[in-house]
Image (cartoon, rainbow, N blue to C red):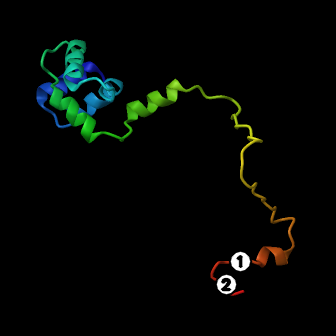
Amino acid sequence: MDKKTLIDLFERRDKKRKRILYELYFDLITSRLSARYIAEMICKDVGHADMVSATDIKFCRFQFKGKVTSTAFRQGFRSKPVSASPVQPEPDSQSPGPTAFWADPNTMSTQENIIVESKFSKK
């Protein structure tokens, strides 16, 4: 999507215009700036005065809050480079608490694998 498509959708009063507005200006709309200021900035960027109002920005913030858009989702992946080898955090030797013991079921005997204790079993 581009700005020309957005202008055309607003002129036609298309019902998907606010969704496209949110996708194109995701970072600006989700910022902590006032809705009126954001609307003015978008109108200047598009070149049409009074095309976007503060109520459009408020609607987008409320309606699409927490929903990941396709454009925003792709931008999030572009901002983080993919490394060839995954980096695993080093274990913290000073962390308190018990360490878990994991047994390999292939090395255990059949009897040890069958025994399952439940909090509901009678002792």
Relative image position of residue 83 (x, y in whole percent): 65, 28
- Position of residue 15 relative to residue 46, above or below, is below
Q: Which mark is residue 90?
A: none
Q: Is residue 44 left or right of residue 24?
A: left
Q: Characterize the local packing of mark 1: few (<14), some (14-19) or many (20 or more) Cα atoms within 10 angstroms.
A: few
Quarter-wise, where is residue 16 in the image? top left
Q: Is residue 95 left or right of residue 5?
A: right
Q: Are marks 1 and 2 in contact (CB under 8 Å)?
A: yes
Relative image position of residue 8 (x, y in whole percent): 18, 24
Pick the quarter of the image with the N terminus: top left
- Position of residue 17 relative to residue 67, above or below, is above
- Position of residue 113 relative to residue 88, above or below, is below
Secondary structure under badge 1? Answer: loop
Quarter-wise, where is residue 70 in the image? top left
Relative image position of residue 92 (x, y in whole percent): 74, 40
Residue on which the image places disc 1:
117
Residue at x-position 83% and y-position 78%: 111
Residue on which the image places disc 2:
121
Pick the quarter of the image with the C terminus: bottom right
